[in-house]
Amino acid sequence: MTANDRDQSASFDEIRQIRQLSHNLNIGLNNQQQLLEMRDLSLAPDVISHIHLVDSELATFESYMHYEETELEQLRALTETSALINSSLDPDAILAQAMDEIINLTGAERGYILLHNANSDELEFRVCREPDGESNGVSGEIQGEAQGADISRTVLNEVFTSGKSLLTDNASSDARMQGSETIAKFTLRSIMCVPLVYKDTITGAIYVDNRFRENVFTERELNLLMAFANQTAIAIENAILFARVQVTLDEITEVKELMENVFASIASGVITSNADDRIMTFNRAAGQILATPPEEALNHSLPELLPRIADFAGYMRTVREQNQPAVFEAHTVIPNRSDAILNLKLSPLKNMANETQGVAVVLDDLTDQREREESLELMTRYLPPGMVDNIEQIAGLALGGERREVTSMFLYTCPYDIFGEGTRPHQLMELLNVYLEVATNAIHQARGIIDKYMGNEIMVLYNTQLNPDANHALCAVQTGIVLRGAFIDLYKRLGISPDPHFYRIGIHTGVATLGNVGSMNRRSFTAIGDTINLSKRLQENATGGQIIVSEDTVRHIIDHNDSYNEFRFEERESIQVKGRKQQTRIYEVFRADE
């Protein structure tokens, strides 16, 4: 209890004591008056009336003090509640506590705070206080049959229309409330409602009522509620503004962090300079490319950092003066590194007035890329294009491999003895390469993968991981027909007419194991299995100029093509191949028009 509370309590005690003395004096005087009347005497006529007047004035004074005490208590509560509301930028819980205080001070049975939804412009309950429980937070649109559905819409409409507070001590008999179905249905009595106004805009309302008692509220309670409403409106708007600012700050922080992360993670080197060519930003990638820590590069001259790039300063002047980007490659020597090939993109940095204030440089180190391109260019001379294009996929295959259906083709190009006796080894190699080159070109055009060269023979695969093709059997047979035509053209260029032709081709379709063989240091991509062995046996059993295919290859072509009239297959006598117990049905392939 404060000193003021103690003083006020002492004052009430003194008044009660004085009233008790007045009461006792009045009783004593009345008794004395009776005794005097028995002796035909009396007191002065105004004595007792004066005592009654004093007692009445004391009662009035006491009532006045009670009124002042109640108003003072309400003002203190309003001050504390205002401080409580303004101490938080998340007002929901604070408003709920404040509503409890309002109900306690005004004698209301129920209380509600309603706010306009900024998105839907509908009126929603923000705080609800019911006698049988409580609910904080948004509880739905006012049109819904939720908590507070039995409050007077007439009162709310009047307050929102007029923008003024409303007090009624008996709503059922108030002429302003006539026609209100809610008041009639729920027999509402005492009601107060005040608007929440911020900058001349009604943002909501505070509504309290008592459904069972009349004359609960006076102008004093209305003034209290209006003062509370003014504080509440400001607190809510402050919270909304704070939330917006917080969201904006969060977005700015998120974007800033994203930009920093992106800037730091960019693989390209990024450097920006100001109008004096001083480096303002220098990311980690730039430091790695130029072998310079970012902290050492900042505020240094950009042309001095790249002194070995020919006419770099000239490029910068051109970019600034013409406001046009420049892109070029440069061979340079970077300190603490070997020779490097850099791709540089220079762009003007402009301010809001579209004035060039500096230059942005994007660096890409092409050294490794150029080395890889040179290596791949060299590899294409020795490896099939499919392997070169998918070299990373080949490298990813584990030692061992995977089983898949393929079509295997073995090609015998020519016998060694056709080059004549006395041919030197290097001459033999040159002549053999003529036949192998013709075959290689035809195979590559048909997307076949050359597994290996075996002297004058070639092993070819279809539908590997490197050249997937659902119709691989047909593709292999087409390759055989193309090879026949290519060799016939070669014979013409060489001026020979071999009879029979030199080439022999064997083709078989089945499941094989494909993958890498070798060691961790050196490996080779190949295929093994019965499918590969049988295609080799078919090639060995073919005679000069024959293209021999297995029954499985023919069946695969028929199963995967609704109609085919490009080839004709003539069955030959079944053969017994090494490693197989059963006979193998074989067919010779011709063009349909042959």
Image (spheres, rainbow, N blue to C red):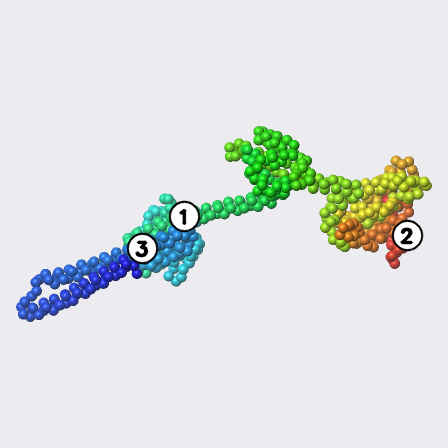
Earlier in the chain: of badge 1 and badge 3, it is: 3
Horizontal relation, residue 167 to residue 241: left or right: left
Classify 390 as above or below 66.
above
Q: Residues within 10 Å of mark 2 (few under 14, many from 20)?
A: few
Q: What type is the residue that disc 1 sits on? A: Asn
In this figure, which residue is indicated by the disc labeled 3? 76
Q: What type is the residue that disc 3 sits on? A: Arg
Image point 13% across, 60% down: which residue? Answer: 50
C-alpha gap between disc 1 and disc 2: 97 Å
Query: From this viewpoint, which residue is outermost toward the right?
Result: 421
Write down the quadrant of residue 358 in the picture: top right
Marking on residue 573: 2
Per the image, label 3 sits on a secondary structure element best described as helix
In this figure, which residue is indicated by the disc labeled 1? 238
Q: Residues within 10 Å of mark 1 (few under 14, many from 20)?
A: some
Q: Quadrant of the C terminus?
A: top right
